[in-house]
Image: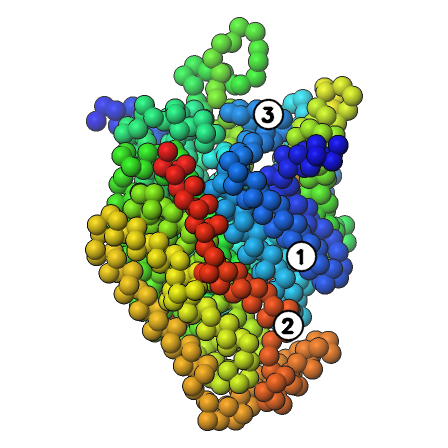
Amino acid sequence: MESLLQAYHHLAVVFLMMTGFYIMVAYDNLVKKLIGLNLVQVSVFIFFILMGKVGGGSAPILAPGIEAYANPLPHVLILTAIVVGIAATALGLALAIRISRACGSLDDRLIAHLERDED
Amino acid sequence: MPFITRNPILRETAHTLAPTTLLYALYVQFHGDYGPGGGFQAGVIFSVGLILYALTYGLERAQAVLSRRTAEVLSAFGVLLYALTGVAAMLRGAAFLDYSALAQQPLSGQHIGIMAIELGVGVTIVGVVMLIFYLLTDTGEAG
Amino acid sequence: MSATAADALLAQLPILLVVAPLLGAALCLLVRDARLAWGLAVAVSAAALVFSATLFARTGGGLVLEYAVGGWQPPWGIAYKVAPVNALLALVLGAVFLAGVVYAGRSFRRELRGRRLQPVYSALLICQSGFFGVAMTDDLFNIFVFLEMASIAGYALVASARTPRALTAAYRYLLMGSTGAALFLLGIGYLYLVTGTLNLSDMAPRLQPALGSPAVVAALGFIGAGLLLKAALFPLHLWLPNAYGYAPSAIAAVLAGTSTKVALYILIRLLFGVFDAASFAAALPDVMMVLAPAAIVAGSGLAIFQRQVKRMMAYSSVAQIGYIALGVALVTQAGLTAGLVHLFNHAIIKVSLFMALGCVVYRAGDCRLSDLAGLSSRMPWTAAAIVAGAVSLVGLPLTSGFVSKWYLVSAVLEANLWLPAFVILAGSLMSAAYGWRLVEAAYFRGGESAGGAGGVSGAGGGSGEGGQSPVGGEGGAAAEDNGGGNGKSAEAPPVMLLTTWALIALNFFVGVNPSWLTSACRGIAATLLG
């Protein structure tokens, strides 16, 4: 229990991720599913950013009198991962626009129903 | 034109902000090797300026400034610049993207290298973000 | 002089495999003529195949190529490292992409009629660059970035068919693939947290003392879940049937040969190279040991009942991934060898099958079972290609499928596992069942009215095509001879047939002369198992 409380920031990560998964599973709207996916991704990003924190560490810029620096590597990694996430989100939104134009709906269950009829 | 705002305050604000944003993007771009910043951030800020312009004056005028085709060419050009900078280092006998080999002095080579790379990144980002913007605002059947 | 130049070039090959397709992708966007873009893509892919074959040949002699990108030495910089396992994957990728790109030229012009093809070729090359990057790099985060680069290009490629079904398939593929990627990234985070490094060669010894700690268990779980989702191991396969079934044929062929294989490759590398698969990480192979037979039975079983043949082949892929996973899950040298052999063989077999189906789509506009009726007289070469592929899937002797089944069954029996051995044989019977449905449709259905049936479907397709878009003289001409119902002229274009048959020839070559592949795979397995 105590270790759980110490790791409260990790609980935030878990909470965000589960919220994301819940949205992806529970909502039928395709754009909402994409938002859920984004929450999952962001939770992983936050996990990485927390990882770079060094207790009492300053920003990772060399300066006199400072000995502990935050680890910049996870932050740099996450910059890249954010770009990857943006690319996927942009593609997803563009697809959503085309889907709503082609199917007249963004409702996952409705579309799945129509597709089952077609098969 | 669904995007042209009739609100004068909004319009004037954007009118002032758009060119400033573009200028600021250039600052971020070319100070990226010393201060915080770099090609990606500059590219995004630059596209924000263009998008602001598009939101206030309409897509047509924005596309007159930067057409879809130009955006596509820009995104390809940036990737080419990036990759060719790396290949240039290879041709000088060093590893891919080893900037030190780009000039007589390793330090100035690194300056040249990072400038070229960041410019490539920035140009690509402007191209890609504008392409995404045009794709998402596209109301007709095109592309 | 020339020897040193050749050595210098060899040293640069790992990065060239990644940069050449990327340059090609950028150039494809710039050129105005779609055929020129295709030519560029073919040239780049051919170069990549030469590069990867060279790497495969050179690493076979025990050479391990290391490459420090940007001159930053490992473990600080991003390092590329080419051992035989990397070279094997690169060889698969090179062969599949070259065949796919050559094939795509005519296939795209028919299936993506009236569209600008430059972005499609560009995306295909970005996908290629990403997958080659995964194969070459020794940096875990780099693997993630390259994998996502290829995957996102892959989602766009599936959607490029622009039909409603393709769009929704691509959307679901994107949702599931990105979820898998997020889980994979989380696992990478835990590994970095524990070891402080991302370099795979550096990570393994550092992880050794920490094996068994909760963080490493979490890493194993997240990486396993994420990669199995990307590899579409049953029951995480839901994105696959529609994505392959409704993508343009050339894209379905390329993705079927690469995307799931690359995910499995990463899993193999991490499982054996970083986690200690035999002792600590045994939980993941245990899970795969349960899922893989289920995948074989469920995939083959569902394939039998498909009427759309591309989807049938997609479900068959689900089953074949089960075979590969089964070999890997044994965690023995024989099992891993069998898994790697089948990874290669299945890529070749399934790509040639999807290409043959693409030839059917080229003429008939679709490939339901009914479109195959009378195929043997209309398109004898295509029909024969489908039979060759189906026979290899079953695993009859002289085909590469036989080689992998042989190795797999002997590996399973060596481990005294009778139930999986039974499942493999049952899976073969089931693949014979759906293979027979294809043969029956192509050779025995509509046989009495070959001209009539061909004429009806041909005329329907022909008039539809002619009415939709008479693009260029060629489309019109093709529709004409199709509508004519003339048996001889209804075959697919020679380029498409040639690439299909080139892969089938490779397939039979492996079937007759498998020793080069199996000895390479055995060596890789021995290295991975330490």
Count up the numbered dots. 3
Q: Nearer the viewer, residue C442 or C177?
A: C442
Q: The residue tagged with tag 2: helix, strand or loop?
A: helix
Which residue appears at 29% of the width and 46% of the height?
A: C330
Point out the tag, 2 or 1, that comes first from the N-terminus: 1
Q: Report the quarter where the C terminus of chain C lies.
A: top left
Residue C516 placement (x, y as % from top left): 48, 50
Report the Cα–Cα distance between label 1 and label 3. Answer: 33 Å
Counting other residues with Cα less than 10 Å from the Cα at mark 1, is it few (<14), some (14-19), or many (20 or more)? many
Residue C379 placement (x, y as % from top left): 55, 80
> In this figure, which residue is indicated by the disc labeled 2?
C494
Q: Amino acid at mark 2?
A: Pro
Q: The residue tagged with tag 3: helix, strand or loop?
A: loop
> In this figure, which residue is indicated by the disc labeled 3?
C72
Q: Are marks 2 and 3 on the same chain?
A: yes
Q: Amino acid at mark 3?
A: Trp
Q: Nearer the viewer, residue B142 or C410?
A: C410
- Please, which residue is most extreme toward the top here? A65
Q: Residue C423 occupies which quadrant of the picture?
A: bottom left
Report the Cα–Cα distance between label 2 and label 3. Answer: 48 Å
Which residue appears at 35% of the width and 54% of the height?
A: C407
> In this figure, which residue is indicated by the disc labeled 1?
C42
